[in-house]
Amino acid sequence: MNLKGVILGNKASLRNRMRQTEFHIPGMDCPSEEQIIRLRLGEMDKVHHLRFDLNERKLWVTHELDEAFLYNNLLPLGFGARIISTQEGIENVPEEVAVQRRALIYVLLINAFFFMAELVAGLISGSMGLLADSLDMLADALVYTLSLLATGRSMRSKRHVARISGYFQLSLAVLGFFEVLRRFLSVSAMPDHLTMIWVSMLALLGNLACLWILRRAASQDVHMKASWIFTSNDVAANLGVIIAGICVIWLDSSLPDLIIGTLVFLLVARGAWRILKLSRVSR
């Protein structure tokens, strides 16, 4: 056999090893049993995807393992698992994974756009709130990129992505605190309140669209939960910058902008802590 034939044969062999096994699990009737099964099977390197249907008590496992090995790992849980069927030669990405990827691509593009928009607007207007929110958008855009790399991979990979996301966001929060402190200690000019309000309103609409997209994905995977946490934080931050812009007008002071910048970075740090906690709980 020539080299081309060997390569094609190896690719075909890899495809043939990928399979999807369907289980009926009578004792799996709530999310707690689902989580137990995720923790049981999700650690395995050759388990690529788990799909659950709690109403029908069914589980589909996309893997490169022997069905008996999976069954023997489910049996001690006491949920009455039994194998229904196995489909060989799986090539297509499971539909849930495809939905996750589409959702993450959309929210990545939205966050990348508003990072640039808020960064430019923050520098022009002199608003700490807008700059803080733009860095939060940057963190989200990078996190969504990491999440795209983890989608469809093992639970271990997803926890790793969530952990990197949390540490990265925490680092941005610390840097933001130092910048706010520097501005508190120095004389800062009045920010442009109209730019703060209008740009934040547009960013708010963008983040609400992201939440809608992520909700439609309806995933319980740890890296998708992290994405939801990030975007929820962004909505709160947008509302805070809008309120700060109104207070700048009312009080004729830059202090509300610095305060909201501090609060946004606290929110970023809180989100980072939740994500790090989530990555540990999902072990």
Image (spheres, helix red, strand yellow):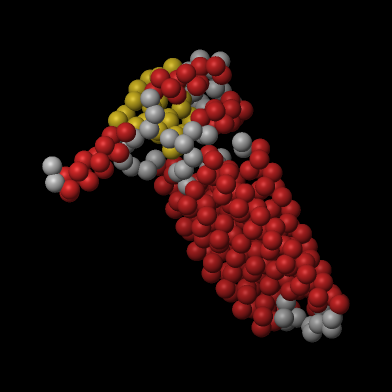
Of residues 186 and 43, the one drawn nearer to the viewer in this rendering:
43
Residue 111 figure quarter? bottom right
Outermost residue on the left side: it is 1
| Above or below 50: residue 121 | below
| Above or below 70: residue 237 | below
Q: Is residue 165 visible to us here?
A: yes
Q: Is residue 202 left or right of residue 266?
A: left
| Above or below 198: residue 50 | above
Of residues 167 and 140, the one drawn nearer to the viewer in this rendering:
167
Q: Is residue 232 visible to us here?
A: no
Q: Residue at x 65, y 64 (%)?
A: 136
Residue 266 figure quarter? bottom right
Of residues 201 and 15, the one drawn nearer to the viewer in this rendering:
15
Residue 76 figure quarter? top right
How far across and down, in percent of the image, does residue 36 sit? Answer: 59, 27
Q: Is residue 109 left or right of residue 18?
A: right
How far across and down, in percent of the image, does residue 12 sit? Answer: 24, 39
Outermost residue on the front side: it is 2
Q: Residue at x 53, y 39 (%)?
A: 155
Q: Is residue 45 left or right of residue 92?
A: right
The C terminus, quarter of image = top right
How far across and down, in percent of the image, does residue 132 sit? Answer: 70, 68
The N terminus, quarter of image = top left
Q: Residue at x 72, y 67 (%)?
A: 175
Of residues 114 and 2, the one drawn nearer to the viewer in this rendering:
2
How far across and down, in percent of the image, does residue 108 sit? Answer: 51, 60
